[in-house]
Structures are given as C-alpha cells and as structure tokens.
Amino acid sequence: MEDLVKMEIQEFGGINVTTTPGAVSWNGRLETAYRACLWSRFSSRILLQLATFKAPDTDALYRQVNAIEWDVHFMPAATFAVYCTLSDSSITHSHYASLRVKDAIVDYFRARTGKRPNIDVHRPGIRLNLHIRGELASLAIDLSGDSLHRRGYREQGGPAPLKETLAAAIVHLSGVAGDFPGDTILLDPMCGSGTLLIEAALILGDSAPGLQRNAKNFGFMFWKRHSKKIWDSLVNEALEREEAAQDRTWPRIIGYDADPLAVAAARKNIARAGLTDKIIIKQAQLSRLRCPGKNGLLITNPPYGERLSEHIAVKYLYRFLGNRFEEDFPGWRMGFFSANPDLADLVGLNWNGRHALYNGPIKCRLLVGVHRQRHKQSIDRIQMTDMEISAPGSELANRLRKNWALLTPWAKEKNIDCFRLYDADMPEYNLAIDIYERFVHVQEYAPPKSIDPAKASRRFTTGLQVLRELFSLERSQLFIKTRKPQKGRSQYQKKTREGKLFVVHEGGAEFLVNFTDFLDTGLFLDHRKTRARIGELARGRTFLNLYGYTGSATVYAAMNGATSTTTVDISEKYLTRTLANLSLNGYGGSLHTIIEADCLQWLKEERRRYGLIFVDPPTFSNNRHRRQTFSVQDDHEELLRLAMGRLSREGILLFSTNFKKFTPAPTLFTDYEVQEITAQTLPRDFKQKGSVHRCFEFRHKPAPPEEKT
C-alpha cells in the first residue's frame, strides 16, 4: 500500500516523498506529521526519525543512543518501550538490542537528573523504534502510539477481521471516494464485523480516521515537543469537514452476513463509529442476495478457505456469487478481495483492476471488475435419437424408447432433470440406467453364478452400444460401474482415482455429483421425494441430518427456511462435499454446522433438541476407527431412541432405510407415533421396482393431561 500512503503524504504537505518496501519517507513540518496521524487511512505508524548511525555491535549501539539528548524529547517521569527489528545485522538478538537501547536511555537520565524513566511494554507513553540493516541503525520516536489501524470503533470482530487500514485500501481501490455518487448503492453481502462498510462510510463522510481514537493513544501526547495548538487546530478542522459532509447525498450502504454473532458485532461497531443512520446491517445467507437497486458497487472479503475442505467449499461459494452477480446485478461493479486468486475466475467477471495486498502474512489480491451481461444458460439435457437399432440389442432399445416416452413428459412437468430410466426391466440386461441431465450413469448388477460370464459380458457390451447409439453419446457422457454386494470396508472405498465433480439440478437447487469414484454419485435419486418432504417440514425448524452423506437433505432444509442445520457423518470426504453443496447454493456460516463423528456415539453425548431430524443410516458398516460394526436391522432401535431423545416435543423425525428385509421393532410403535410413508416417498421412476427404500415418520406421543398442566 506504499503508493496509497505516498499519495496521502503529498496531500498532507510532505516533500521529498520516497517509498521502499513497507515504508514511505518524507520531509515536512510538524503539522504534516500530525495530519498523517489524524487523517492517514492506510498507514500503520508515523515515525519521527531521531538519528541514524553505525551500530556494528551492541556496544556501539549503546554509545550512539546514550549520546542523544533525550531530555529534549521526554521527561524521566514518562514510561517508554523500545521495539527492534534486525536485517542482515551482526547483532542477532533483537531483544538484547532493545535492552541496550533502554540501558543507554536510563543511564542518560540517571547521570543528568538522578532519576530514571520506567519501562512499560504494554502501554508506554513513548514508543521508540530501532531498525538495523547491516551496520546502519535508525532510531525513531513513534508519534502514532497505538497502530493507526485501531480507529477506536471496533471492539470485536469476526474470526479473522480485516485491519482497518487494509479495509480502507480495499474500498478505495474498489472505487469509493469522496465523489462517490449518491444514487449508487454500496453493498457487502458477507460483511462480517462491518469493517469494509465502516471504512467506506468514513471516506464518504470525509471523516478523519483518527478522530475517534482516544487522544492519549497518540504517541506525541507524551512527547515534550508536542504542540497542542497545532493539534487542536487540526482536530477542529476535521470536525468542521465531517459536519459539512453530512449535508451531502449519501448512497445507501448495506451489509449482510449469515452469522448472527457477526451481525451483532457489526451493529455495535457501526454504533461506536456514529454511523447507525448511514449503514444498514441484516442477517441473511448469501442465497438471499438480490440486487437492491439500479447502480452500485458490491465489495466483499469472502472466506479464504485455508483448510482443504474449506478451500473446496470456497470454490463453489465464489461460483455462486459470480452467477448471482451476473444474473441479477446489471450495471454494477465489484471489488473482490481474496487469498485465492486462482479461484477468482469462477466469479466469471472481466477484471479490469488487479491489486496485490497482504492480509498479515497472507498474499491476497483485490480484483475489480464490472458486470458482464450473460444470459442464463439453460440446462443441457440429452435427447433420444430416431436411430433404428437392429439385433442384437433391439429389445433393449425398444424398452428404453418406451420408458423414455413415459418418463420424459412427467420429468418435464415436474422439472426433474435427473431420473432413473431403466432398472433391470429385462433379465437379459441386468442394468440400472440413470439420466443426469446430459450424462448417463450405468450400473451393471453382478450376474448370478448360473449365468455364463462370457454371455453376460457380451450382453453388457451390447447394452452400452445401444445407449451410445440411442442417445448419440460422446465418451465423456457415459459412466459405467459394476454393482455388487458391498461388505466391510469395501463399501466406502474409491473405485478409481479422484474424479471430476459435475453440477446437476434438482428442486431449485444445485448439487455436485461424482460419476467415477464411488458406486453412488452423491445424490440418491430414489430420495428425491423424501428430500422434498424435508423441505416441506423444515421452515422455522432446526434440522439435524444424521448419516448426512453429501448433505443434499441439508441443502433442502436450508433452502426451505430451516433456522439452522447440523449435519453429522463419520466421513470427512462426505462432509467436505456437504460444505461444497451448501456453498454451491449460497449457504454457510455458523448456522450450518458440520460434525465429523460416529452418529450413535454423538447422539449419546449431544444435549440440544431439534425440530426436524432425518436419519438415513447405511444397511451395514464397519467403523475401522473404533472396530465397531453397525447393522440397521440390529441397531435401528437404539439409534432411533437416541435420536428421538434429541427431537423437540412437537418435532418430526424421518427415518429411511434401503434394507429390503427391514422389520421395525414393535416397541417403537408402542412408545412413539409412527407412520410409514414409503408410498408417498417413492418417485415414479422407481415404483416399478417396488420398495427400493422404506420411510417412516416419528413423532412424540401427546403428553398426558397432568404433564401438560
């Protein structure tokens, strides 16, 4: 930010301004230094250089410091501290160098006055900065005192709040200046503790950023050469400028955040900054983002995603933000600050400004762009051709044509893009064929031992050839797997190397599917109506998703108004996909909790209650970490009783299982209100196979009259 600081210093009246990495130097009167302390938006500290000298060792350092006339700068009664940085110096210990400077100053005062100043490293009256590069030392008094990023309005921030100086640079480089049009909206959809918006408002209001600091926080207040007259004059001038700016036409300044704690912190910070009437803060998920007006600037510092799971989620969060911006914000500009510039292309803007900035040690980029008109792309779906298929395979082709004719009108009417087209309808072709928009996912059921393997292989090859010809499929559109009973660890093991994730649509949401790594894609198509039922029940309820898999049910709950969601699964990989699916649809933050745990064990320790619970356990699984096994038939009663213990009195629990021989424990029907809703949750494209799953709704029985009283 050196160039921004140089620009400020020149405006303050500094001359001979030079920049070096991390520093700006200039000559000027005391007034320019005071103006920098009061008005600089981008500087961290203002240092008055007292002396430069050679310090090849600590003895030379002591002699040079002791020769300075310290009683010109402060009294023995003042407290002070020394902060040292070393670069290519033969002096290798910065703390020892600081001690030698302190000794030199204390000895100076003791020799002349018989008194010694006290050291206070926490709140010193006088801060001294020693910098040694090679043999050359520079000693300066810190006129700013506390770092200038501490404006005085912020007492609490989010998990990683931006420094105010960096926030000011971001909004300035994004286009916020004193002449920002009053009919233009300034919006931050992920505002955190509100720092970007507050710094923007200070610029728009011509407010000196140092005006709200406690005057005692400035280092020059304890300096003997301090001029109260000059300082008071500058403060009065700043107050007059701020008052005059109140008459300008202010733009609307709006902030949203998904985290209620961040919203509360932002509102408190805004109140302390005296900007309550200028900035509006609301709690909202990114999914609720809509264009609030004709012209505007969207400026944001989205999550960075330092861990791998978060990095993947951030990738799809960027994608969502870019899509929403391009669909709904014509005429707007965007300032996008990120530590993941490699992912910035997912936002989809033409960036016409790129600025390298550091957030602490993290190298970041501020990207500035304008809205690019883009028509919303329609979903790319495969189409069946009129090609005649001759034997062998003509029977399969005819059955696929028949199923296609029956299912596609229904799918179009219900806005369904992913469905099962064929499920071993003919014993000769023992396949499950699923349509995922423009992709075809084929699973071959393992043939019985009575079938000649060579014959089964020929039929499988014929079936694939029929699919390629019937749908004119390219190689990249067809995915093939063999399905067989899974036991033990093999049920969760990857089948191939890491595959690509594709985005598909269902129920107004988007989901990530993987056609290669596992038998399942990440979106159970037979649960389509179950997810819809969860959406119907979710509004105004807290939602718990046990054995959450890739979080598709969680997305439905969030999308349909759940007040919060909690997803529990033992697989880190599935939970990473859950985070990605939530981000892909604009959801995240503290209201959507992801927990990696064994569900049974977690239920034994959990104490919160939930208004809606979905339990969809595996038929059988091994927990390799705890050497435990789970069988839905053997363990479902314990699981459901524990889950019902977490269900609120008026809540609803949905239990689903794909175990075809499942028999629910009779005692569950005695102790709870239980209704089987399997028929209502079977989609049309799965009904020909009968009950591919079973689904039940559980409720607590009404309390006896005396309990109600």
Image (cartoon, rainbow, N blue to C red):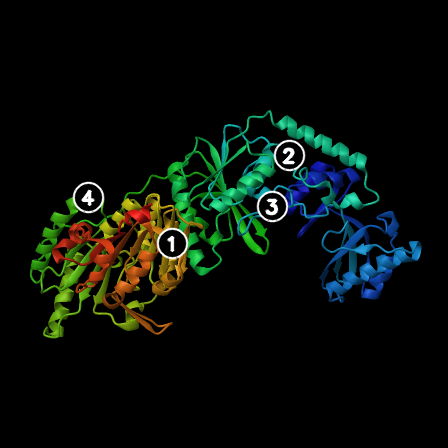
Task: Please name the residue that numbered disc 4 is placed on.
Answer: 412
In the rendered image, the quadrant that contains the C terminus is top left
Mark nearer the viewer, 2 or 3: 3
Mark nearer the viewer, 2 or 1: 1
Three-letter amino acid code of the residue under disc 1: Thr
- Cα distance between the residues tagged 2 and 1: 43 Å
Q: Residue at x 72, y 37 (%)?
A: 12
Three-letter amino acid code of the residue under disc 2: Ser
Residue 106, compared with residue 14, is above or below; it is below
Three-letter amino acid code of the residue under disc 4: Lys
**Neighbour class for label 3 at 10 Å: few (<14), some, many (≥20)?**
few
Mark 2 vs mark 3: which is more N-terminal?
3
Mark 2 vs mark 1: which is more N-terminal?
2
Task: Please name the residue that numbered disc 3 is placed on.
Answer: 155
Q: Residue at x 79, y 52 (%)?
A: 79
Would you say 193 lies left or right of 32 here?
left
Task: Please name the residue that numbered disc 2 is placed on.
Answer: 207
Q: Are marks 2 and 3 in contact (CB under 8 Å)?
A: no
Mark nearer the viewer, 4 or 3: 3
Three-letter amino acid code of the residue under disc 3: Glu
Label ID, residue 566? 1
Residue 457, compared with residue 63, is above or below; it is below
Secondary-structure class at tag 3: loop
- Cα distance between the residues tagged 2 and 3: 19 Å
Q: Name which quarter of the figure residue 500 lies in.
A: bottom left
